[in-house]
Image (cartoon, rainbow, N blue to C red):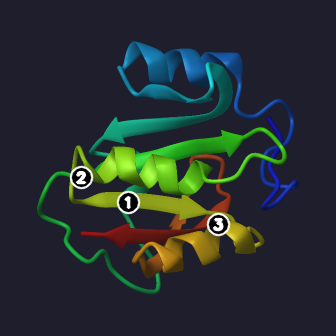
Amino acid sequence: MQASGNRKQWTNGYPSVEAVQNDIRRDGGFVIEDDGKIVGYFAFLPSPEPTYKEIFGGQWLDDTRPYHVIHRMGGLHGTHGIFSSVMDFAFARDPNIRIDTHRDNVIMQHNLAKHGFTYCGIIYLLSGDERLAYQRI
């Protein structure tokens, strides 16, 4: 799959096969199909998310209730509706969703705003890379 929103975000083999296998082991790896063909992938994982423990330049909308996080969302080039499909799936299972994205991924930021997410601040991945953090309740 290709990262259309920010090609610099996913480099050096990310997401690795091991990351996806770990999502699946945690019952959190999901594919998106269109007419029986896999067109996308995403991870939908329960809290806590270690990199969300500290947030800078803002705060979570609610930092007391459990939440789910969406990671590693991607789709085949030219496929449309992936984001909406993931949101339908996620909010049917949990009303409290957190997600983060690279500062350069303006397509993802547009989709987050379009789907009612609120920008909450900056988090840092274990690698030290900065991400913009969002939540919708």
Per the model, the C-alpha gap separating discs 2 and 3 is: 20 Å
- Dividing the picture into quadrants, the one containing residue 17 is top right
The mark closer to the camera, 3 or 1, is 3
Asked whether disc 2 touches disc 1, contact meaning CB atoms under 8 Å apart, the reply is: yes
Looking at the image, the residue that sits furthest to the left is 64
Residue sitting at 40 percent across and 27 percent down? 28
Count of numbered marks: 3
Q: What residue is pinned by disc 3?
A: 108
Q: Position of residue 41 (x, y in %)?
A: 60, 33
Please give the residue where the numbered disc 2 appears in the rendered image.
67
* x then y, percent, for residue 16: 71, 24
Q: Secondary structure at mark 1?
A: strand
How far is mark 2 from mark 1, CA to CA?
7 Å
Q: Indicate whether 53 appears above or below 59.
A: above
**What SS does tag 2 mark?**
loop
Could you tell which of marks 2 and 1 lies nearer the N-terminus?
2
Mark 2 or mark 3, earlier in chain = 2
Q: Is residue 125 visible?
A: no
- In the rendered structure, the answer to whether residue 32 lies left or right of residue 44 reads right
Q: In this figure, which residue is indicated by the disc labeled 1? A: 98
Above or below — where is 131 with respect to 84? below
